[in-house]
């Protein structure tokens, strides 16, 4: 599987304005679960006209050296693409932990748990782009119970 983007639950809890431009005539809207600046940032969000009730949301997640997120799960499906550095990730549905380097990607299916999401380096930052397809209004990331 290719790496998916993981956005820590604690990073998606605060409301903030969405910074994005419309695509194909559909204007993105503000969403209530954008994380605080410096770690993760919603960069785009729009309703999917061919999938009523669904929304596509793009989030860039930044990890400082050795930074990790607690276990969590996401609403809907998540595709992650590593932009820089290396991300260590493990998902309950896709197999054991592995390190994904810049240019690699992974997928997290609906209902799965993101058990490990961390910067694989203790000296260099890392970032990834996470693309969510989830119900409109859903909380994108929540802690595992």
Image: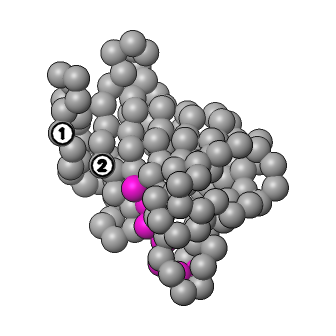
Q: Residue furthest right?
A: 96
Task: Specify the quadrant of the image occupied by residue 61.
Answer: bottom left
Could you tell me which secondary element the residue under label 1 belongs to? loop
Find residue 10 and report its horizontal and vertical position in percent.
48, 63
Quarter of the rendering containing residue 25: top left
Q: In what quadrant of the picture does the N terminus appear?
A: top right
Residue occupying the point 72% across, 56% down: 90
Q: Position of residue 9 (x, y in %)?
A: 51, 57
Residue 37 visible in this rendered orientation of the protein? yes
Of residues 95 and 32, the one drawn nearer to the viewer in this rendering = 95
Local SS, label 2: strand
Residue at the image point whose x is 55% and y is 40% from the top: 78
Q: How far is the residue under mark 2 from the one under mark 1?
A: 9 Å
- Going 33% across and 50% down the picture, which residue do you hit? 42
Give the residues in magenta. 60-66
Q: Which residue is mark 1?
A: 21
Residue 131 in the figure: left or right of residue 14: right
Asked whether 108 falls inside the magenta stretch, the response is no
Q: Is residue 133 left or right of residue 60?
A: right
- Who is closer to the viewer here, 120 or 46? 120
Does residue 136 appear anywhere in the picture? no
Q: Which mark is residue 109?
A: none
Q: Can you name the residue that lies furthest to the bottom here?
A: 123
Outermost residue toward the front?
103
Colour scheme: one colour
Q: From this view, report whether residue 136 is shown above or below residue 61.
A: above
How crowded pointer 1 is (Cα within 10 Å; few <14, some 14-19, many 20+) is rated as some
Location of residue 145 with respect to 108 vertically, above or below: below
Q: Indicate the position of residue 132 as horizontal and vertical percent values.
A: 47, 38
Q: Which residue is mark 2?
A: 43
Residue at 41% in and 19% down: 53
């Amino acid at each position: 599987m290719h790496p998916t983007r993981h956005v820590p639950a604690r990073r998606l809890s605060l409301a903030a304005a969405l910074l994005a431009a419309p695509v194909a005539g559909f204007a993105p809207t503000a969403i209530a679960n954008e994380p605080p600046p410096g770690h993760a940032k919603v960069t785009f969000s729009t309703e999917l006209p061919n999938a009523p009730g669904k929304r596509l949301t793009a989030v860039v997640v930044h990890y400082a050296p050795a930074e990790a997120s607690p276990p969590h799960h996401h609403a809907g499906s998540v595709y992650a693409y590593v932009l820089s550095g290396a991300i260590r990730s493990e998902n309950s549905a896709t197999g054991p932990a592995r390190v994904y380097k810049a240019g690699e990607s992974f997928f997290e299916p609906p209902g799965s748990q993101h058990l490990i999401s961390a910067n694989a380096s203790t000296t260099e930052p890392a970032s990834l782009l996470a693309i969510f397809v989830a119900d409109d209004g859903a909380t994108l990331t929540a802690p595992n119970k």
